[in-house]
Amino acid sequence: MIHLLATGGTIAGEADPASGGARYTAAVRPVEALVAAVPGLAADALSAEQVLSVDSKDMTPADWLTILSAARRALGGAATDGLVILHGTDTLEETAWFLHLSLPPGKAVVVTGAMRPADHPAADGPANLLAAVRLAASPAARDKGVLVVMNGTPHGARDVVKARTHGLDAFESAAAWTSARPDGRFADVDFAPLPRVDILPGYAGAPPDLIDASVAGGARGLVLALAGHGSVPASWLPALRRARNGGVAIVRASRCAGPVIRNANADDDGEGWLTAGSLPPPKARIALMLSLAAGRPFTSD
Ligand code: SIN
């Protein structure tokens, strides 16, 4: 039995008549309607649950915890062989990575969405849903951690990114999904509300006041999405040192693809900074939130 958790997104979206076809509203159709739209789905081998109905730009860390408890409950059931999660594409890679770190490895977990709403004449949701259910039912998807499937292509949760705003091929990853490894390092943790961790973008002239504002707002961690190889602007140093001295965890990351190497172009050890390695800033943020919540060291592995 494959269990389906629906959370909204374009896959459940419909055109907005008021916009004359220019826009659509995400998260309109219930999961039963999405399943009914896929002729090839064997309904008797599926169970389905509407967990949330949101446009994923509005997904919050509290929503992640709601999805996590539904997913843990479903995976704990002896009848569940695998899990499929329907999600908006905008923050799909964040939820996939969050679950990759916090669900027990073993049973297949596959996340999918759609780039076109459900009432589009060439909607991609039904094919993505079918592909996700088939992948979740396949032995090949076991022990890979959380997978994402879009446009006929599976991806591992660690590597996948939404790389383009448009097109059915919006998702890509640097490594083949077949090499994905399970994680689940926080599968034993019951998270209370997750701590606030902010991402601060680096760009020419970026003001350091944003650092103080984040800390004053209650951030327990900062991920610096910096230019180049995670290059820290000199004007940020005093505010970063204030934050660090106040116990705020700081991760040096890059807005470019590719690794940020520890102590390579900054004194990470001297400043007490962490480094994101090859994790993009949104995924480094999630790893830091979970590490802080669990009281365990942050790792970019
Ligand atoms: C969303 O992320 O919920 C809307 C956009 C999409 O699913 O493609």
Image: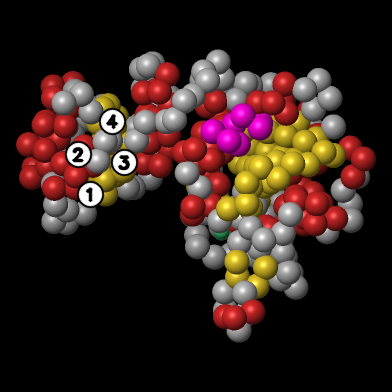
Q: Nearer the viewer, mark 2 or mark 3?
A: 2
Q: Is residue 223 left or right of residue 20?
A: left
The tag earlier along the polypeptide, 2 or 3, is 3
Q: Residues within 10 Å of mark 2 (few under 14, many from 20)?
A: few
**Residue 145 appearing in the image:** no
Task: Inspect the magenta stretch and tell me whether residue 70 lies in it.
Answer: yes
Pick the quarter of the image with the C terminus: top left
Q: Position of residue 147 (x, y in %)?
A: 63, 37
Q: Is residue 63 left or right of residue 255?
A: right
Q: Which residue in the protein does label 4 denote?
A: 220
Q: Tell me residue 174's x, y (percent).
A: 51, 42
- What element does badge 3 sit on? strand
Q: Which residue is mark 2?
A: 216
Work out whether residue 47 or residue 146 is closer to the camera in this orientation and state it: 47
Q: Are marks 1 and 2 in contact (CB under 8 Å)?
A: no
Q: Residue at x 77, y 55 (%)?
A: 34
The amino acid beneath tag 4 is Arg
The magenta span reads: 65-71
Contact check, label 3 and label 1, Cβ < 8 Å? no
Q: Earlier in the sequence, mark 1 or mark 4?
A: 1
> Is residue 209 depicted above or below 139 in this figure?
below
Q: Tell me the residue at 57%/74% (across/down).
A: 23
What residue type is disc 3 on? Asp
**Does dot 2 land on a helix, a strand or a loop?**
helix
Residue that label 3 marks? 198
Q: What is the distance, in whole Å, between disc 1 and disc 2 at their CAs?
A: 19 Å
User: What is the distance, in whole Å, between disc 2 and disc 3 at their CAs?
Assistant: 12 Å
Residue, x 55% and y 47% (percent of image)? 92
> Mark 3 or mark 1, which is nearer to you?
3
Q: Could you say where residue 101 lies in the image, as x and y percent from the top left?
A: 52, 27
Q: Amino acid at mark 1?
A: Gly
